[in-house]
Amino acid sequence: MVLIFAETWEGTFKKSTFEAVQYGAACAQAQGTEAYAVVVGPCTPPVESLGAHGAAKVIHLHGTDRFEPAAFASAIASLAKELGATQIVLSGTANGKSLAGVLAAEADAAAITNVTGLPSQFAPLTVERSAFSSKGIEQCTSHAACTVLVLIPNALGTQQASTQQAGFEDRTVTFEPRSTPGLAQVASGKIPLPEAERVVSAGRGMKGPEHWNLIEELASVLSAGTACSKPVSDIGWRPHSEHVGQTGIQINPQLYIAIGISGAIQHLAGVSGSKTIVVINNDPEAPFFKAADYGIVGDAFDVVPRLTAALKAHLS
């Protein structure tokens, strides 16, 4: 059977959770078995609603309200062994990435990260993953009895949900944290960048943090997340939690708007999975234009307010 870690954010399911559940359900169907989802900690939506995305059963583990990788890994690995799971599916969010390695060790499993598609076969398990900063695709094979599969968020998308309800089971588990990590509080209510379908990002072309209201207003109109280039976060204009790129957050939105960003290769490595890229830059020779689907050569302080106004008029 296939076990999926159904991650929550602020007590509700992430979009990437539905993507992971649908992926796990597809794997289970291909093998003639079932997909179970495991939810850990408080969750506002009914957990059985994951049945609409393919979970045959949801097991809700109670006993903690705080994410701690080692404790979560121990509980999930124990459940995987009990159920005889051959694959454990996670989304490659920040929590998923920090959980994957220790979970694989606890479950005596192999691990494949940056997964971009369904396995081409299951005996042995063979799957494609993104490699070399998204510049290539690598085919990986696992001969292990159990394999942890970590998906790139938004790489696969989600299908229309059904009306099916999953069976569910509540369990209380004793979680024993093995460390006490520090917590960095990120503004509540903001769209997590790996979850965002639309992202508006800016670089040093904005000339200072005092002009970021232009970016935030455009993002608000589009219901988009906000991001920035590495130099912007390094000099303190924006928090590091918004830095996208090879050494920051890697994203795969439907729409990525880059404003005043030249397009260094390290930045492109983190956003190349975007379905549509729009570049706004006053330098017609900016490298980013080569990766763009649409480009606007112009001053951001002129183009962005006009674009925002046009979108408001169109959407009203």
Image (tube, rainbow, N blue to C red):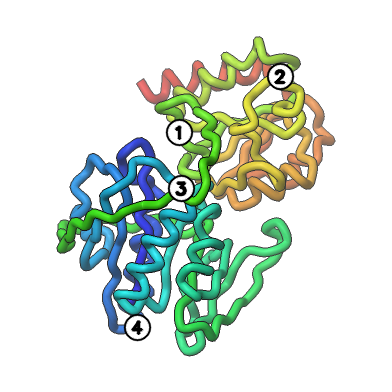
Residue 79, above or below 19: below
Residue 259, above or below 16: above
Disc on the earlier residue, 3 or 1: 3
Q: Name the residue under label 3.
A: 68
The residue nearer to you, when weighing 272 against 59, is: 59
Disc on the earlier residue, 3 or 2: 3
Q: Name the residue under label 1.
A: 191
Q: Which residue is drawn at 43% across and 54% down?
A: 71
Residue 284 place in picture, x, y as percent: 81, 32
What element does badge 3 sit on? Answer: loop
Disc on the earlier residue, 1 or 4: 4
Residue 100 place in picture, x, y as percent: 52, 60
Disc on the earlier residue, 4 or 2: 4
Q: Are marks 1 and 2 in contact (CB under 8 Å)?
A: no
Q: Do the residues labelled 4 and 3 touch (CB within 8 Å)?
A: no
Q: Residues within 10 Å of mark 3 (few under 14, many from 20)?
A: some
Residue 234 place in picture, x, y as percent: 75, 28
| Residue 31: numbered disc | 4
What element does badge 1 sit on? Answer: loop
The residue nearer to you, when weighing 110 against 127, is: 110
